[in-house]
Structures are given as C-alpha cells and as structure tokens.
Amino acid sequence: MKNWSGLEKWNPSEILLPRSEEAIQQIVKTALDKKRKIRIIGSGHSFTKLCVTDDILISLDNYQGLVQVDKSSHQATIKGGTKLKKLGELLNAEGLAMENLGDIDAQSIAGTISTGTHGTGANFGTISTQVRAIRLVNGLGEIIVCSIEENVELFKAAQVSLGALGIITQITLQCMPSYKLKMVYEKSSLSEVLKTYQSINQSTRNFELYWMPHTNTVLTKKANITNEEIDKIGIGSFFQEYILENIGFKIFCEFAYHFPSKNKWISEVSAKTLSTVIKRAYSHNIYATVRAVRFNEMEYNIPIEAYEEVMKEIQRSFEKNGFKVHFPIENRFVKGDDIYLSPAFGRDSAYIACHVYSKKKHKDYFQKMEDIFRAYGGRPHWGKLHTQNANELLQLYPKMPDFLKHRVEQDPEQVFISPYLKSLLGIF
C-alpha cells in the first residue's frame, strides 16, 4: 500500500473491504478477540502515517451511497465510504448540495471529516461543522450513535476523530438546496491582497489565493452563488485548469527537479502566464480542481489575526533562505468552531499550505515554514505533514483530555490505535 503522494508505503497483513455495517462489526469483534489492530483508509490522501498498519487495513470503497434523504430539512445520511465526487452527484440528483467543500473530491466523507478537512470562506467552518449525526462501530464492536442532540460530548469528539474512536459507517449532513457558483480566477499582487483580504472575505462567499514564491504575484479565486447559465468547457478554462495547472505544471516540476537553480525562474514564468478565467457550474463541480501533479504537503491553521504577519514572515524566509521551491502557497479562510480536535477550535482562522513536488526533498523547507507557523500558535492539519508531538498538541488543543476520555470509553483495548496515533495522542 502507499498513500496518494507515494511518501508512505506499508504492508498490511490483510486488506478487507466490507459491504455492510454487520460485516464491519464482525471484523472488529474478531480483531478484538484475537488482539489484532485495525486502521481505516479512505483514498490515501493523508500525507501522514494515519492509515499505516502492519495488521488489518479496512477500506470502505464497497460501502458507499445514500442511506436516506429528508428534503424537508435538507438533510442527507450517507455511508461512510462514499467518495466526495460521487456524493456531490448523488446530492445534486436529489436537489441538494453541501454548503461548502475543499478543492479535492477524491476523499471519502468519513476520511474527510476525520482529519478536519476544510474548504474556504470566512462564514464557513470545516466540513465537519456540516455534520449533524454520526454512526460508528466502536472498538468493542458496538453500534454507537451521537449527534447534535444525542451523546453530544461524544459527538464533538467524533466530528474530527482521526479514526481513533471507531469506524464511521454513517454520517448525516446538513445540506442546502443545490446551487450554482461563479468562480473568477484573477492575477493580483500579494501586497494588495494583504491590505484587502478582510473586505474581500466579507464580500465573497468563497475566497482563496495562491502565492507564487519568489514573486509578488498571487492567483485569487473568488466564488459567489449565481443564476447564470452553466458553462461548457471553454478554451480559457480548459487552458488554465488542464494545460497550465496540470500538463504544463508537471513539465515545470520535472524541469525544476533536474535543474534546481531554475525554481525561481519557473515561479516567475508561472506568474506571468496567469490570466483571468471565469467558470460557472453546480457547486460540487466548482470546488474540486484537477490534481494530476503529485506532491507532499504541510498545512497549518493560524489565528486570522496573525495571517498578514505570517505571510510577510514567509516572504522574508524565502528571501533569506532562497528555497528551491516554485510550488504556489495556498491560503484559505475558515470560521471557528467548537469541535474538540478541529484545528479551527475556538478561533476564526487562516490555513496556509506549502507543497513540494513528490520527487523532491521537502523536510528543510517544511521545517522552516513550520517554525513560523508554530511561533504564531499554529495547529497542523491532521492529514498533512508536521512534526508536532503529543505534549505539544496537548497545549494546542484544550479539549484533548476530553477527546482522550471518549477514546478510552469507545476503544479500551486500543483496537484502532497505531504507533503513529500513540505519538499524536500520548497513549502508552
């Protein structure tokens, strides 16, 4: 097995693909009796060792689909293994949509919420905030249900759980009537955006930006609900999304890999090729972007108040260290929440993501970026690379003790605990 970027490779003793909740229960009970360990994998989009195990690996790829739709409340219950791309299509067929999504739709819905995955938009929380109920098989093989009304404290732990409480079999989402978005890609300057990002966030439903390293250039993406007609794939959008962002970018990545001194030049050339592009489509087809170039990623959540200074620190670090990096740095904005292990717990936030082509070394660059994030109280995205240990994470997450209490109750024999989770959660 390997994850999406190819960084993590491992050899589970078994790979199981259950087709029913009953089958999942039986696997857990058997593992409990035989003192074996289980980890769960969605699509392998975590860059960390979250899915790594030398014992039983469970995939829910054969456990997908809608369970129930309540159109009066705009709620839908979904099987945990359902991939986001499929989910968007299923909901749209029912006249519904998720209120917000991230920019990759390959993940399973259970994996998405378990790692605290997010989109962007100052008025929207992480994807986990859209969850209204969770059904899981715990470490004793029991069916456990928690929601905004039932077992509320456990629910707050289960909304972002790292797979440490059990196997999520069903998720009830608060949706909204299906809608179309108009996405506008535009070139701007980082200095200008740092002056205006607050007002842009107030006037724009979904706002994010990509800084082109070694330059003052950013690509901004602004999306708002529209009643305009859906586009066919036009020459402009096709050139931007498929040619520049994938085929052309892959060529640049290979060139920079073989000629490291050219990274700054490539970033400057990439900045010059940016142009205005407009896309209109149903929401689930707007949020997701094509990712043909494999990379490794580190992403940190920082308090929104620190955002401008952190980005300036990053610029200064590039000037000082001359990183041989041309991959754009992604900036997104998320509303605070009250979920125990959410990086956005208790604060409105900015998320800053650093990427490196999968063939290139990333540790030195990521370490220096991480030093900046940590200096401003940064919390790492659970699915992205970082070096924080259990003692450090305990200081960042005031509700960590409450989460650990529920973990012991739901999985007293540590069926779902791997060495990596022990290092994160301080379990001995």
Image (spheres, grey):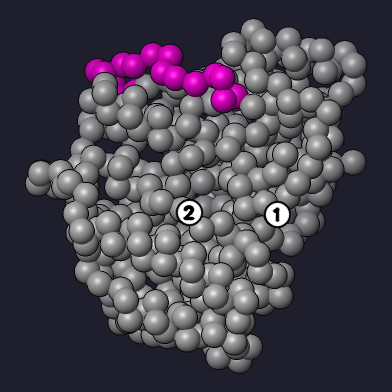
Q: CA distance from mark 1 to mark 2?
A: 16 Å
Nearer the N terminus, badge 1 or badge 2?
Answer: 1
Residue at image coords 54%, 85%: 262
SS under mark 2: loop
SS under mark 1: loop
Magenta stretch in the rendered image = 60-75
Residue 408 visible (yes or no): no
Q: Which residue position holds label 1? A: 7
Q: Nearer the viewer, mark 1 or mark 2?
A: 2
> x and y percent of residue 166 in the render?
68, 26
Residue at image coords 33%, 29%: 89
Q: Residues within 10 Å of mark 2 (few under 14, many from 20)?
A: few
**Mark sitting on residue 292:** 2
Mark 2 is on which residue type? Answer: Ala
Residue at image coords 30%, 33%: 97
106 above or below 134?
below
